[in-house]
Image (spheres, rainbow, N blue to C red):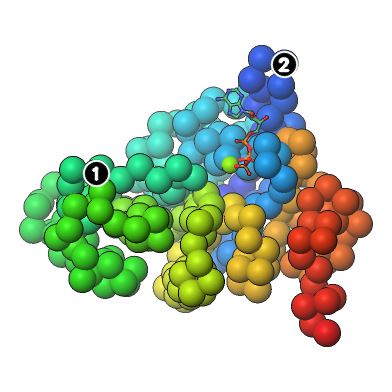
Amino acid sequence: MPEPLLDVRGITMKFGSLVANEDVTFAVNEGEIVSLIGPNGAGKTTLFNCITGFYKPHSGRVFFNGIDITAKPPHYSARLGLTRTFQIVKPLKEMTVKENVMTGAFLRTSGKKQAELTAMEILELTHLAEKSDVPAASLTIADKKRLEIARALATRPKMLMLDEAMAGLNQTEIKDAMELCLGLKRKGITLLVVEHIMEAIMPISDRVVVLNAGKKIADDVPENVTSNEEVIKAYLGERYNAKSKKS
Ligand SMILES: Nc1ncnc2c1ncn2[C@@H]1O[C@H](COP(=O)(O)OP(=O)(O)OP(=O)(O)O)[C@@H](O)[C@H]1O
Ligand SMILES: [Mg+2]
């Protein structure tokens, strides 16, 4: 067995007396799309923050590509090839779309020309090329979400972590986002995706990790997760039923 690309071991994160992540262990293998799901407040974003060094967990360790990145600053992990997006999009509004993406590219180059070339390549890939010179502030929510992904991609990640990149999108935009995820997988980029839109992520996920009240309650292929009684009770309920989808 090759070692996993991302190896999360026994992460516990507390805010005062609230245990937001409790002894969470899971791994993501190179080339996989793994989704992280669970009810509001389950601890998904907190776990992202622990993995990418925005929080220092109370206990547990995080390894990326065999290197211990626990509590290392986000730019350290980004340099190793692990980048994330944020649930609340925050483009640099006064900058153009291209300039925003260039801020990502500057992780790997100090040359403006090179950063611009990288940005244009990524803007093509994410279907934002036509809007490269407009101010980021003027983008629709769907394009802002795409820009967030583009900026992360410009850092040339091995692995990308998306926190609700599809929230607020319409059906067509969700389909585009699914295609983009599958396209990134084909390019060899590993994905860890937090999402509430089951119809969008179940079909593209190799594996699904479920959090509830800070604890991992399932870690399996989508078919098994959607028929897992505990997961249905805690989260899926009537929201998504794989069996009814197939019939
Ligand atoms: N900085 C913080 N300080 C105090 N409590 C926090 C902080 N961040 C998160 N929490 C709490 O930790 C718990 C987990 O929150 P988190 O944002 O990780 O959930 P989530 O699974 O991402 O939810 P959602 O699906 O709504 O985005 C919640 O009870 C939340 O109120
Ligand atoms: Mg969240």
In the image, taking residue 227 as reference, residue 149 lies left or right, namely left
Image point (40%, 36%), residue name: 74
Residue positioned most to the bottom: 247
Q: Depth-wise, is mark 1 or mark 2 nearer the camera?
A: 1
Which quarter of the figure is the C terminus placed in?
bottom right
Decide if residue 185 is in sight here.
no
- Counting labels gives 2
Q: Circle 1 sits in a helix, a strand or a loop, which is it?
A: loop
Quadrant of ligand 1: it is top right
Locate residue 193: give its quadrant: bottom right
Q: Left or right of 144: which side holds 241?
A: right
In the rendered image, residue 109, in percent from the top left (x then y), is placed at 18, 51
- Name the one closer to the observer, 66 or 93: 93
Task: Note whether ligand 1 is within 8 Å of mark 2.
Answer: no
* Residue type indicated by callout 1: Lys
- Is 1 rendered above or below residue 41? below
Sort mark 1 into few (<14), some (14-19) or many (20+) by Cα contacts within 10 Å: few
Q: Nearer the viewer, residue 95 or 59?
A: 95
Q: Earlier in the sequence, mark 1 or mark 2?
A: 2
Q: Quadrant of residue 118?
A: bottom left
Q: Which residue is mark 2?
A: 17
Q: Which residue is mark 1?
A: 93
In the structure shown, which secondary structural element does the residue marked by tag 2 occupy?
loop
Residue drawn 66% across the image and 22% down it: 14
State how far apart marks 1 and 2 are (Cα): 37 Å
Q: Quadrant of the N terminus?
A: bottom right
Question: Callout 2: few (<14), some (14-19), or many (20+) C-alpha neighbours within 10 Å?
Answer: few
Say which amino acid is labelled 2: Ser
Q: Residue at x 91, y 57 (%)?
A: 229
* Image point (62%, 66%), residue name: 201
